[in-house]
Amino acid sequence: MANLNITNILEKMTGKDKDYRYMATSDLLSELNKESFKADQDLEPKLTSTVLQQLEDASGDVSGLAVKCLAPLVKKVGEDKVVDMTNKLCDKLINGKEQHRDTASIALKTIIAEVMTPSLAEKILVCIAPQLIKGVNTAKGAEIKCECLDILGDVLHRFGNLITKDHEYMLTALLSQLGSNQASVRKKSVSCIASLAPSLSDDLLAKATLQVVQLLKNRSAKSDITRTNIQMIGSLSRSVGYRFGPHLAETVPLLISYCTSASENDEELREYSLQALESFMLRCPRDISPYCEVILNLALEYVSYDPNFTDSMEEDTDEEGQEEEDDDESANEYTDDEDASWKVRRASAKCLSAIIVSRPEMLSKLYLEACPKLIERFREREENVKMDIFNTFIELLRQTGNVTKGQGDIDESSPRWLLKQEVPKVVKSINRQLREKSIKTKVGAFSVLKELVVVLPDCLADHFGSLVPGIEKALNDKSSTSNLKIEALVFTRLVMASHSPSVFHPYIKALSAPILSAIGDRYYKVTAEALRVCGELVRVLRPNLEASAVDFKPYIGPIYNAILGRLANQDQDQEVKECAISCMSLVVSTFGDGLQRELPACLPILVDRMGNEITRLTAVKAFSVIANSPLRIDLSCVLDHVVSELTAFLRKANRALRQATLGTLNSLVVTYGGQIGSSSYETIIAELSTLISDMDLHMTALALELCCTIMVDRKSIQNVGLAVRNKVLPQALILIRSALLQGQALQALQRFFASLVQSANTSFDALLDSLISAAKPSQSGGLAKQALSSIAKCVAVLCLAAGDQKCAATIEMLKGILKDDSASNSAKQHMALLCLGEIGRRKDLSNHVHIENIVIESFQSPFEEIKSAASYALGNIAVGNLSKYLPFILDQIDNQQKKQYLLLHSLKEVIVRQTVDHNGQSELQDSNIEKILALLFNHCESEEEGVRNVVAECLGKIALIEPKKLIPALKVRTSSPAANTRATVAIAIKYSIVERPEKIDEIMYSEISTFLMLIKDSDRHVRRAAVLALSTAAHNKPNLIKGLLPELLPLLYDQTVIKQELVRTVDLGPFKHVVDDGLELRKAAFECVDTLLDSCLDQMNPSSFIVPFLLSGLGGKYGLSL
C-alpha cells in the first residue's frame, strides 16, 4: 500500500504544473523521512531516476526539495543505486549544462555527507574519484575544476584512507594544479591536498613536500604561484602535524628567506610565510627546536612592520592629563584602505603567540626580548591587530602562571621576577589604551589587566591609583557597552580580592559611586558583577574589627540601600538574586553593629529566600557567613525559624543543599548555641543519624562534625548526650565496620568518640565494649582489614580522651587478651594488637613493663594476619618512645633470623611515620640511623623478594629524611655485582619520589640519571625496577626526568620488545606450555610509556613509538594486556 502511494507521488512529480510537482516532492520527502519506509526492488530505480530528474527542474523550489530528498534516500535504497546516482551526478557536474551544475554539486555533497558504511564509501570512491580527477585535469572552465576539487576534498577528508592504491595518481594530478593560472583553482587544490595528506604514506608525503619545495626554490616563478606554494606548505603541516617534522630542515630556511626578501608590496607572501611558521611551532614542537630563535627574531621584527607609517609619538611624554589631546590624535590617525601591512603584523603576533604556547622553556628569553616589544605595540593603529597583540600578551601571562605555579620569584632570571619588572610599563601603556575612544580596545586592555592580576596577585599595589580614572570612565561613560562594564567590574573585583585593603582606601570615594550605580544597571550580568564587586568593597572598607584606616560609616547606608533594592525585588534574574543574597550577608556580617535598626527588616527577607527553591542554597550559605561574624549579630528575631528550616533541609534530596546546611548549622551552634532550644537539638541529632553511612563519606564527615560541635558546646545538657547515644551511636557503629571508611570521615568518627566519652552521663566502658564488639566477625565472615584498622584507631582515641587511668586499664586488658593463647581467641588477639599499635603511636607505653616482649611473642602465631598485626603494633609502639624501643627492634633484627621479615616491617612503620610527621625527624636522625642503614644494606641481597621490597621502602623513606647521606650510598650500590642489590636500589629510588616537594629533590635532580640508567642492566629484574622508578618519576615529578628522555626513551622502547632468550617452553607431559619471563618487564614498560605520554608529551615523538613498538606489542603472542 505504501509503495502504491509512492508510485502516485512519483507520477505527480513529473506533471506539468510546478505547484503539483512541488507538493509531490514535499510529500516524497515526508515519506522518505519515515522510519517505516522501505522501497522494494521495482520501486528503487523509479525513485532514484525521478529524484535525479527533479534536480534539473526549471523551478528552483522543486530542485531544492529534490536535493533534500537525497539525504534520507541514500539510507533507504541499495548501495548500487546510490553509486549509480553518484555516477550520474558526477557526469552532470563535469559534462552537463551550466545551469544544472550548482545543483549537481550540492546533490553530490549531500550524498557524500550521508554515507556511513565503509563498503559504500569505497564503491563511491572507485566510481567518482577518477572522474573528478579527470575533471580537474581536463575541464576547460575554472568553475568546473573548483567544483570537482571541492567535492574531491570532501570525499578525501572523510574516506581518503580507503583507496590508498590511488593516492599517488591523485597526488600527482592535484600537485599539477598548484601552477594553475586561476587563483580559485590553486586555492581549492591546496585545500584538497590538505584533505588527502593525513592518509598519505610517509613516502608520498615526502614526495609532495619535495615537489613544493622545488617549486619554491625556483625564484623566477610568479609571485602568485609562490604564495600558493607557501600556503601549501602551511596547510600540509596543519593537516599532518608532527609527521611534517622531517621536512622542516628544507622548508623553514626557505620560508624565512622569502619573508625577509619579499618586495615591500608583497605583504601576503610575508603573511603566508609567518602563518606556515606558526603552524610548524604548534604542530612540530620537537623538530622545530633548532629554528625557534630565528623564528622568534623574525616575528619580533615584523610585529612592528609598518612601512607606510612613521610613529613620531613618544610614549615617554604621555601623561594622564593629555586625555583630550590623545583623543584628537587617535581620531586623526593615518588610514589607507590599500595598506595591507596589518596582515603581516597580525601574522607575526600569532606566530609569537605560538612560540609562547609551545615553548615554556623560552619564557625568560621571551620576557627579555618579546615582552618590551609587545608592550610597545599596544599602540597599534589597526584595531584587529591590536586585539591579537593583547591576546599574545595574555598568552605570555598565562604561560607564566602555568610554568611558575607554586614557585617564588626570588631568582632574577625567573619569568615571574622578569614580569614584575615590566609591570610599570604595562600599566602606563594600558592606561593610554583606556583613554582611547574604541570600546573594543578598552575591553582588550581590561582583559590584559585581569590576566596580569591572576598571574601576579599583588603587582598593582603601587599603580592602582593611575587605573582608577579608566575604571570610572568605563563604568560612568554613557557610550560604554555592557561588555566593557562587565570587564571593568571583573578586573576591579579581582584586583580588590588579591591586594591589601589599604591599597584601595584613598580611592574608595571615587570607586564606590560608579560601583553602586552599576548595581542599578538594566542588564542583569552587569548588576550581578557589580554586586560581586560590592562584596569585595565591603571587605576593603572593614578588613577587621579593630581600628580601621578609613571611616566606613558614611558608606554603610548607600551600600545597604543599593543591595536591599535588589534583594527585595523578586522580579529579576536568578544570578542577580543570588549575588544580592551573598552580598547582603557580607554587609550584615561586616557592618552589623551599625545596622541594628535595619536588621529586623533585612533578615526576614533572607529567611524568606530560604523558602524559595531557586535561592535557598545561597540563603543557607548567607546565614553561615552571618553566623561566623565576630560581631555576633543579633539573630533572635529569626533564629528559631532558621534552625527549623535548616533541620528540614537535611531531609532534602539536593546533596549540595544538605552539605551547606550542615556547615551553617555548625556555625549557628558555635555562635548561638545557648539560644537554641533542647528540643531543636534533639530533632537535629535525629536527622543527622540518617546521614551517617558509607554511601556518602563526605556528608558523613560533615554530619559527625556537627554532632561533635553539639556535644562539645552543649555537653551539660543530658538530653543531647542521650539523643546522640540512642540515634547516632548505632549508625556510627555500623559505619565503623565499613571497608570504605577513610580520610576525613574516619577522622571525624574518631573525634565523635572522643567527644562522646566526655559528654554527660556517658560510660567509657560501655563505649569501649561496643567498639570491641563491632570488631567481632559476623555470620557472613570476618571484617575487612580497613574496618579493623578504623576500630583500632577509634579505640585509641577513646582511651586517650578518657584519661590516663582508663587508658592504662585498657592496655592491661589488651595485654591479657594476648597472653591467652587459645586458638579460639585469634580474632580478639588480632584486634588487641592493632589497638596497642594505635595507642602506642599516640602515647608512650614504656610504663607497661615488657609490652614489647608480649607483642613479639605473637610473631610465633600460626595466623598470618596476627603476625602482620604484631609487626604493625611493635613498630607503632616504637614510634611512641623511639629511644627505648628502636634499639630493641634493631637488636632483634640482628639476632632473630626467622623473624626478620616481620621485624623489618616494624622498622618500616617507624621510618614511614617519621617521614609523615616532620616534627619527629630529628629524633630519628640522632638515634641509631647509621645502624639502621648498615642493617638495611646487609639485607639488600636477600633471596626473599618480600624482604628486599621492605628494605627498599625503608631506604626510600629514609632518603626523604637524610638525602645527603643516603643518595651517595645508594649510588655506590648501583654498580654492585649482586643483581638483587641493584634492583633494591632502583626500587628504593621509586619510593623516594613522592608528589609533595621535599629537600631530596635538589640532590635527586643531578643524580637520578645514574639510577634510571639501570634500565640497561643485564638482569631483567633490575631493568624492571628501573622502569618502575622511571614511571613513578614521570607521574610524581616529571621535571626530574625531562632532560634525560632523549637518552632514556630508546632504552625504554627496547624493553617493550619480546626477547626470545626470555621465552622458554615448559614440558607438561601431554602438552607444552610457553612461558615469557619478560612479560612483567614489558607490561611495566608499556605502562611507563603511557604515563610519559600523559606527563611529558612535549618531549616525545609518538610516531617513533607507535609504528614499530606499539604495533608489535598489540600483535604479540604472549598475552600482553594493555
Image (cartoon, helix red, strand yellow):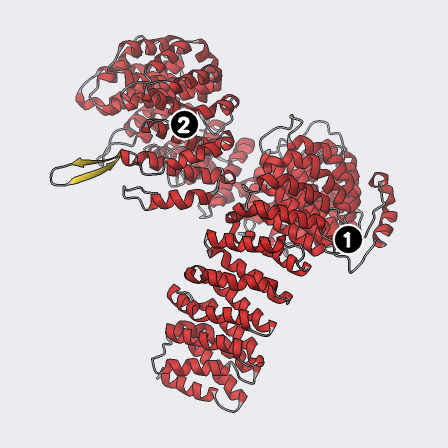
Q: Position of residue 220 (x, y in %)?
A: 67, 57
Q: Residue furthest bottom?
A: 16
Q: Position of residue 961 (x, y in %)?
A: 46, 18
* Of residues 585 and 75, the one drawn nearer to the viewer in this rendering: 75
Determine whether 62 is above or below 208 in the image: below
Q: Give the number of the disc on residue 750.
A: 2
Residue placed at 39% from the left, 29% from the top? 1015
* Of residues 270 and 382, the one drawn nearer to the viewer in this rendering: 270
The picture quadrant where one finds residue 189 is: bottom right
Determine whether 448 is above or below 212 in the image: above
Q: Position of residue 488 (x, y in %)?
A: 72, 46
* Of residues 600 and 692, the one drawn nearer to the viewer in this rendering: 692
Q: Which residue is mark 1?
A: 438
Quadrant in which the N terminus appears: bottom left
Q: Amino acid at mark 2?
A: Gln
For label 2, the SS is helix
Residue placed at 70% from the left, 32% from the top? 420
Q: Position of residue 748 (x, y in %)?
A: 43, 30
Residue 323 in view, yes or no: yes
